[in-house]
Image (tube, rainbow, N blue to C red):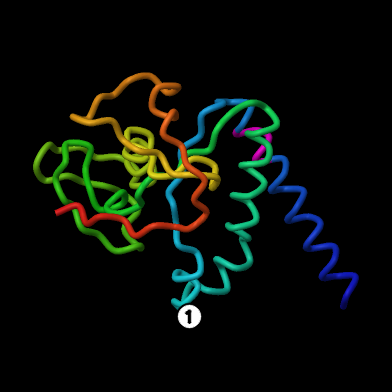
Amino acid sequence: MARHHEKVANRRGDFQFKTAQGIVRQSPLIKVEALRIRNMIGNHKLAKSIADAGWGTFFRILESKAEEAGGLVMYVNPSGTSQTCLCGEKVPKDLSVRVHKCPACGLVMDRDEVSAKLVQAAEPVKVSRTGTVRSHACGDSGDLTERLVGVTGSLNQEKFPSSK
């Protein structure tokens, strides 16, 4: 049984390393949701699936691969990324609903694609778990190097402001 567990762990690790390497090759700048994995594991219906997927380990591998390649992993506030349309309209849906249909603008698209576009457009709240990004006054959207001047050494996940 121990050999079986080791084999499964090795396969998962191999998959994670190869996937992270592929993502880093596509873009040196990677944005992901700053998920609170420990809180999500508290949901007993999802806990086993989340733990089996090894999300936390994957994010650490992704950060490591990005750093080796001179890239960055940026974390964005996950609030509303699966419940908001690209037009800004709130479109609540259960996890079972896989197609996003906006009543305001008529957009019909896979919900994961809409979420990915929202994550891509979002301002980072963290960079590679080594610090937080401070925004410029008046929402100045300078280039990446200008925005990363404010990186600090905080390792704690901060509470996200509500988007109300």
Q: Position of residue 158 (x, y in %)?
A: 39, 57
Q: Name the residue located 35 percent from the left edge and 52 percent from the top edge.
A: 78
Q: Outermost residue, left direction? A: 104
Segment tinted magenta in the rendering = 19-23
54 sits left or right of 113 in the view: right
Q: Residue at x 46, y 37 (%)?
A: 151
Q: Position of residue 129 (x, y in %)?
A: 54, 47
* Magenta span dominant secondary structure: helix
- Quarter residue 26 falls in: top right
Q: Is residue 67 above or below residue 130?
A: above
- What's the amino acid at mark 1? His
Pick the front one: 10 or 73 = 73
Q: Is 11 left, or right, of 32 in this rendering?
A: right
Asked which quadrant contains residue 79, the reply is: bottom left
Placement of 152 over or under 47, stated as above or below: above
Task: Report helix, strand or loop for mark 1.
Answer: loop
Q: Does the stretch in magenta take in 21?
A: yes
Percent x, y of residue 2: 88, 75
The residue pinned by badge 1 equals 44
Q: Quadrant of the C terminus?
A: bottom left
Query: What is the x, y in percent for residue 27?
Result: 55, 26
Q: Is residue 49 magenta?
A: no
Q: Which part of the image, by quadrant, shows the N terminus?
A: bottom right
Task: Please tell me which residue is depicted at 25% across the width and 55% down the height of the picture.
Answer: 161
- Of residue 159 and residue 153, the one placed in the foreground of this image is 153
Identified at 57% across, 73% down, the residue is 48
